[in-house]
Image: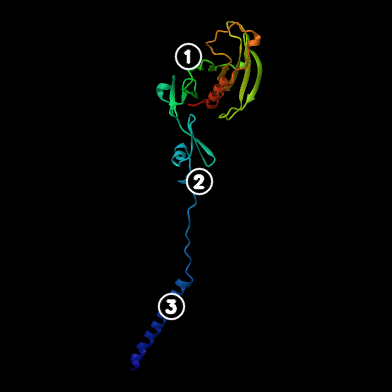
Amino acid sequence: MSAQKGYILPLVLFGTVALLSGIGLLFYFFLYRPQQVVVMPLPNPNIAPTNVIADFEGCVRAGNPIMESYPRRCNADGKSFTELITVPQEATTSSVIHVIDDGTAKEYINYLYNYQTIFDSSLSFEEQEKGVRLVFNDQVTLSVSDTDPENCRGDCSRLLKSEMVTIPGQSEPVKKLYWQSGPIGGVIPQRYVSLVFKNDKNKYFILEANELKFSSSAFNRSESEIKDVSPEAMEILNAIASSFRMNIN
């Protein structure tokens, strides 16, 4: 009996120690274990969120309005995105005309001199010297020059007035010149108005509206017969100027 008591006492002590250890471990894990921390990755500034519009195509896919300019532009969230245009290899020294909208307007693109404009389909149109000069309705012209017409020297028309004006559709003011030609060198005495654009290659694009049509034969007009350019011709001039674009390539 005394021998059995000798075995029981160590077993009781061992069991007590194991029980207390187990209770201590449970107490530690449930009350004092460290809280799990979830670390959120920082946003990468080089990766745009999927819902942020970054280019013209994304702007269009998001259903935003498109401006029928050339190249086309799409506006979203106060920003403007321009369509990237691939110029056809065969068109680098020529021009093309597109019918746009519902057929009431035409878009002229010149890849040789790098400009574009839109005009009413009802106007007569003639292209001269691969786009060096365009004639609209026998009264309005768009020509390409290496010199500023205001700096004309020699046999020139008389400059009546020069001013900077704002043209709808243009981001920068445009120079506007008022002229009067005389009966010199077979030129019909008349008034005309010029709008002058200059690109980054020092090329001048000159839009002009004449008082008379080119088919006119009024060479012997007197000074008193000369009048201002008609509102109809000025309307054509301003419409073409508002859609005019340089550096399209």
Which numbered circle lies on residue 129?
1
- Tag 2 and tag 3, C-beta contact below 8 Å: no
The location of residue 237, given as percent across then percent down, is 56, 22
- Tell me which corner region of the image, top left, top right, bottom left or bottom right, holds residue 24: bottom left
The location of residue 142, given as percent across then percent down, is 53, 18
Q: Tell me the crowding category of disc 2: few under 14, some 14 to 19, or many 20 or more residues within 10 angstroms, Cα based.
A: few
The residue wearing badge 2 is: 45
- Foreground tag (1 vs 2): 1
- Tag 1 and tag 2, C-beta contact below 8 Å: no
The residue wearing badge 3 is: 23
- Which residue is pictured at 62% across the width and 26% down the height? 165
Amino acid residing under circle 1: Glu
Q: Nearer the viewer, residue 215 or 86?
A: 215
- Which residue is pictured at 58% across the width and 9% down the height? 188
Amino acid residing under circle 3: Ile
Residue 16 drawn above or below residue 225:
below
- Which residue is pictured at 48% across the width and 65% down the height? 35
Determine the CA span between mark 1 and mark 3.
100 Å
Left or right: 165 in relation to 6: right
Q: Nearer the viewer, residue 170 or 231?
A: 231
Amino acid residing under circle 2: Pro
- Which residue is pictured at 38% across the width and 85% down the height? 12
Which numbered circle lies on residue 85?
none
Q: Helix or strand or loop: what does disc 1 sit on?
A: helix
